[in-house]
Amino acid sequence: MQKKEELNYISIENSAANAKIALQGAHIFDFKIKGKKRLLYLSDTSLFKKGKAIRGGIPICWPWFGANEEDNTLPNHGFARTSLWKHESTKNISDVETKVRLILESTPETHTLWPFDFRLTLDVYIGEELKLVLTSKNLDRKPFSHSFALHTYFKIDDIYKMTIDGLEGKEFYNKCNNTYNNIQNDNIDFTQEVDRVYQRVDNNVMIRDKEQNIVIKTEGTDSIVVWNPGKELCSRMSDLGDYRTFVCVESANVLDDVVTLATNESYTLTLTISQKI
Ligand code: TA6
C-alpha cells in the first residue's frame, strides 16, 4: 500500500502494464501499457484529500449521476467516489494480466445519503487492455433505482485536433442547453463546452488522437456521456488543469438506461479500453 497526500493506493505492475488505484473511490488514477502512451488524464492540480474526488482517472459515479434529483445538497455524482472501499484481493491471472477486486458496502453513513443496503464490487483487469467490471447488488428488502457511470478522463494531445468515432447519427441530450432529441452530425465541435448524453450507442466508440486510437467497448448500457468543459468553465475549476489535454467519454447508466434492482438482484456495467497505435 502506498500513499499520495492523504490517500492510500494500490500499485500494480506486470509484464504488460502498470496501474494505480486509490482505495478512496476504487479510483484508478494511472494506467500505462508498456510501450504505449499513458491512457488516463490526471490533473496536475488534483487534490488527493479525503472526501474530495480525484480529478482525472476513472471516477465511479454511483448511486446517482450528476445532481441528486431529490436533494441537490447531496454530493454531485453520488458518494461512491469519495468513500473508502475495501481492497478484497489481487490475483495474477498470468504474467500479463492482474485482477484487483474492491468492494463498497452500505454503512450507517451511506444510509444518511441513500437509504438502501447494497454491495458494489469493482473488478479491475490490468493487462494489454484495461477492463472494469462494476456490479451493483441490492441487499435491501425493498427495490432501488440508481444511475451510475465510469467517468473516464482520457489523456489526449489536443481537444481541437481529436475526433470521436461511433456517435454519428446518434440522438443526444445536450446538458448545456437542456435540449433532447438532438442528432450528432459530423464531428463534435469542442470549441465550446460539450456535455452530452448520447443514447442507443450499441457500438464501440473510438477516440482518434494524434498518435493513437483509443477503443472504448461498453457492455451494460447504451448511453455514452461526452464532456469537455471548454476554456471558460475550466478556468473556473481550480483542480481541472488543461482542458485541451483531456476528454471525458463515460459509460453511463443514465436516462433510458437507469437500472432498478429488486432484492438480491445484481447488475453489471463493463468497460474495456484498448489503445491502437
Ligand atoms: O460528466 C459530465 C459532468 O456531469 C459535467 O456536468 C461536470 O459536472 C462533470 O461531470 C464533472 O463533475 P464533478 O462533480 O466531477 O466536478
Image (tube, rainbow, N blue to C red):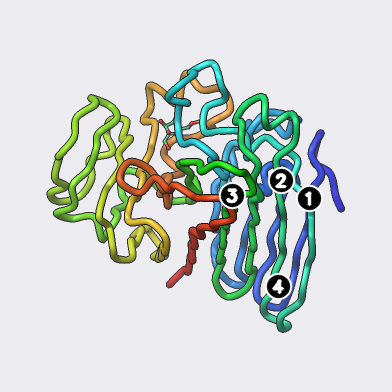
Label 1: which residue? 86
User: Could you tell me which secondary element the residue under label 1 belongs to?
Assistant: strand
Whole-number angstrom distance, CA of label 1 to CA of label 3 = 18 Å
Give the percent coordinates (x, y) of residue 197. Answer: 30, 42
Q: Tell me the amino acid under the disc marked 4.
A: Thr
Closer to the observer: label 2 or label 3?
3
Label 3: which residue? 138
Give the percent coordinates (x, y) of residue 247. Answer: 41, 45
**Mark earlier in primary sequence (2, 3):** 2
**Mark earlier in primary sequence (4, 1):** 1
Label 4: which residue? 98
Tags 2 and 1 in contact by the CB under 8 Å rule?
yes
Write the residue at 49% across / 66% down.
Answer: 272
**Viewed as shown, does residue 214 lie left or right of 264?**
left
Whole-number angstrom distance, CA of label 4 to CA of label 2 = 23 Å
Whole-number angstrom distance, CA of label 3 to CA of label 4 = 28 Å
Whole-number angstrom distance, CA of label 2 to CA of label 1 = 9 Å
